[in-house]
Image: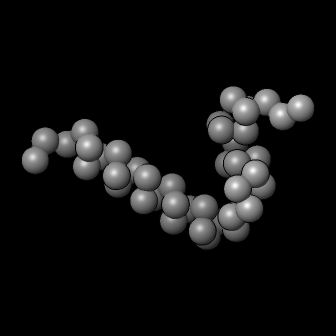
Amino acid sequence: MINLHRALNNDRLLRALTGLNRKAFDEYQMTMRMTARSLIAPV
C-alpha cells in the first residue's frame, strides 16, 4: 500500500501517480504556486 504523505512530499512519486512527465509536472506546480500567491496577496 502506498504512503500518500510520502508521495505528496516526493516529486518523483507524485509524478508517477499522476502520470505527468517532468515538464508537465513542473508547469502544474508553477501554476499552483501562482494561484496560491494570488489567493494570499492582497488585491
How many marks are shown on the rendered structure? 0
Asked whether, in this view, residue 37 is left or right of residue 22, the answer is left
Asked whether, in this view, residue 27 is left or right of residue 22, the answer is left
The quadrant of the picture occupied by the N terminus is: top right
Q: Do we see residue 12 in this rendering?
A: no
Q: Do we see residue 24 in this rendering?
A: yes
Residue 16 position, x and y percent, is 78, 55
Asked whether, in this view, residue 27 is left or right of residue 5, the answer is left
Residue 13 position, x and y percent, is 76, 47
Name above or below for residue 21 compared with residue 17.
below
Name the residue located 56 percent from the left edge and 62 percent from the top edge. Answer: 26
Tell me which corner region of the image, top left, top right, bottom left or bottom right, holds residue 42: top left
Name the residue located 25 percent from the left edge and 49 percent from the top edge. Answer: 38
Tell me which corner region of the image, top left, top right, bottom left or bottom right, holds residue 3: top right
Name the residue located 73 percent from the left edge and 39 percent from the top edge. Answer: 7
Name the residue located 74 percent from the left edge and 62 percent from the top edge. Answer: 19
Residue 36 position, x and y percent, is 35, 45
Residue 15 position, x and y percent, is 71, 55
Name above or below for residue 8 compared with residue 13.
above
Residue, far right: 1
- Colouring: one colour
